[in-house]
Image (cartoon, rainbow, N blue to C red):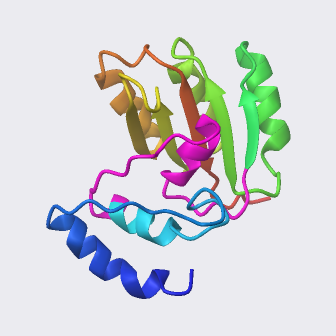
Amino acid sequence: KFNESSKVKTLIEDLLKGKSIAVISDAGTPCISDPGFILVKEAIKNNIEVIGIPGPSAVTTAISISGFEALSFVFYGFLPKEKKDIIKFLESIKKDYSKVLVFYESPKRIIKSLEIIEDIFKSSSACVCNDLTKKFERIYRGSITEVIVDLKENENYEKGEYTIIIEKKELKE
């Protein structure tokens, strides 16, 4: 954390030249209340692939590669199955303190759930991780609309479980 900002430019240049870099922390998972966020965010901006190394759960792996500042986040588990229940649940957490929200979702409900999330968390950013560390692993980033479009273009989107990370935009009262 003491040299992260000053080293990012050099590390990005090295990555753009084809070098591989591993971010390792001596105190936990990088980027989750630990250094690494600035480098991951810059790598994503430069279209450099960021790969998470499996941790104790998909939550920590997904957050560490999201590019979102995860000083705090809330993990809610799986979303309810029915649309009305999803809406009620998301409305109830809309004004929660944390800016970063994490959910699990099944491949059969991912698009429907993201469309509902988009209606409630307008203009928010998303990182949606599919099948982390497995055969169909794929990371989708951008606005929720962009992620939905990218999902629909992937013929394998209904394979593997999903971790959805939403970075909420400031909500007006």
Instruction: Look at the magenta stretch and give its main secondary structure.
Output: loop
Magenta range: 44-73
Residue at 56% over, 65% down: 25
Q: Quick check: 142 left or right of 107?
A: left
Location of the N terminus (image quadrant): bottom right
Residue under the point 50% across and 67% down? 36
Seen at 41% across and 25% down, the residue is 134
Q: Is residue 59 left or right of residue 108?
A: right
Q: Is residue 110 magenta?
A: no
Q: Quadrant of residue 85?
A: top right
Judge by depth and name the residue closer to the eye, 54 or 156.
54
Relative to 49, say whether 37 is above or below. Answer: below
Q: Position of residue 168 (x, y in %)?
A: 64, 53
User: Does residue 23 appear left or right of residue 94 in this picture?
Assistant: left
* Side of 64 where 134 appears, left or right: left
Quadrant position of residue 83? top right
